[in-house]
Amino acid sequence: MDHDHIISAKQLSRGDIETVLDHAAEAAADPAAWADRHENALLGLCFFEPSTRTKMSFTAAIKRMGGDVVDMGTVESSSVTKGESLADTVRVVQGYADALVLRHPSEGSAKMASEYVDVPLINGGDGAGQHPTQTLLDLYTIRENAGFDDLTIGIMGDLKYGRTVHSLAHALTTVDARQHFISPESLKLPRSVRYDLHEEGASIREHTDLGAVLPELDVLYVTRIQRERFPDENEYRAVAGQYQIDAATLEAGPDDLTVMHPLPRVDEIAHDIDDTDYARYFQQAHNGVPVRMALLDLLLGESR
Ligand code: NCD
């Protein structure tokens, strides 16, 4: 894998994807063998938006390899409140760390920030744009449970603002999956994403009703309505609570269906699914550690 920065799932070739996932499988199989791989390595965390999984699993990943984090902390406690620009913040933090993870509410921010730094910069989510490391752990989970051969996936929920969806759709195109997008009319894929997917030769269909496609699916990937990205709270209320599934919904699907969710969930997946064989979302979140270990190892390679 030959990338200076990880900004978008669009930059990942099939070979890159297989390299990271194979490497992650090695980390998962024998984590002890990785324990001092990046002793003294420091990962800079610049999170301008809330995070549980992305931040904690990156932290776990670097610590599991003998390294540590330097964390900007919350926006409120940082110099951002004094008016510092993102370009200045990352230029400073790169001097404290061997790689950076950036999460920011503005789409395009990771690309812009990467132009100011010499250490690897990883996009941990840029507004409604991209979330490529989530995509890699999603792919790891899909490969583990359903495989990439002849894969049919349904992606349901907030397709307009969901960056995990925008990222995953590109990667699924790269692995030649059939993609069904299920959402209310008002939360369909943005035109620009649909256009890019068509240009890449994606196999996509859009629906407003899950029932129409559920029996064909190997994987159902459910997402949260991204409340924080709605310009108008009334618009959010108009769609909130739609597109929920429970164990009864899934009776119409295949027995070996894999249900995924990037988390956090609000009410999209009823708790009666949690203890069924369909549910893979907690496993999916746990896969974030070996996948991020693998990615960091590949990016930090020379310090090994
Ligand atoms: C997602 C995100 O931040 O985009 N969370 C995550 O990283 N697992 C999904 C979400 O917030 O809905």
Image (spheres, rainbow, N blue to C red):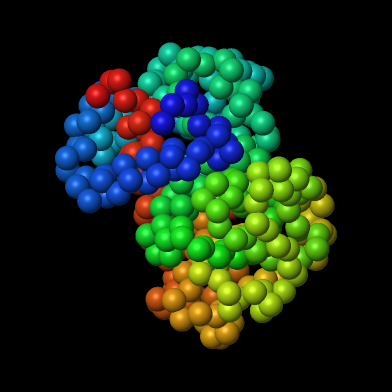
Residue 58 vs residue 12: left or right?
left
Residue 253 vs residue 106: left or right?
left
Return the x and y of residue 28 as percentages of the image width and height.
Answer: 27, 50
Return the x and y of residue 188 as percentages of the image width and height.
Answer: 75, 57
Count the marks: 0
Residue 91 vs residue 109: left or right?
left
In the rendered view, tell whether residue 284 sits above or below residue 270.
Answer: above
Return the x and y of residue 143 as percentages of the image width and height.
Answer: 41, 57
In the rendered view, tell whether residue 266 sits above or below residue 230.
Answer: below
Can residue 74 be seen at all in this image of the molecule? Answer: no
Residue at 39% over, 20% down? 97
Return the x and y of residue 172 as percentages of the image width and height.
Answer: 55, 52
Can residue 91 be seen at all in this image of the molecule? Answer: yes
The quarter holding residue 64 reads top left
Of residue 107 and residue 291, the one placed in the foreground of this image is 291
Residue at 40% over, 17% down? 96
Of residue 16 and residue 192, the one placed in the foreground of this image is 16
- Position of the C terminus, as image quadrant, is top left
The quarter holding residue 76 reads top right
In the rendered view, tell whether residue 251 sits above or below residue 217.
Answer: below
Of residue 40 and residue 121, the one placed in the foreground of this image is 121
Residue at 54% over, 26% down? 78
Residue at 53% over, 20% down? 90
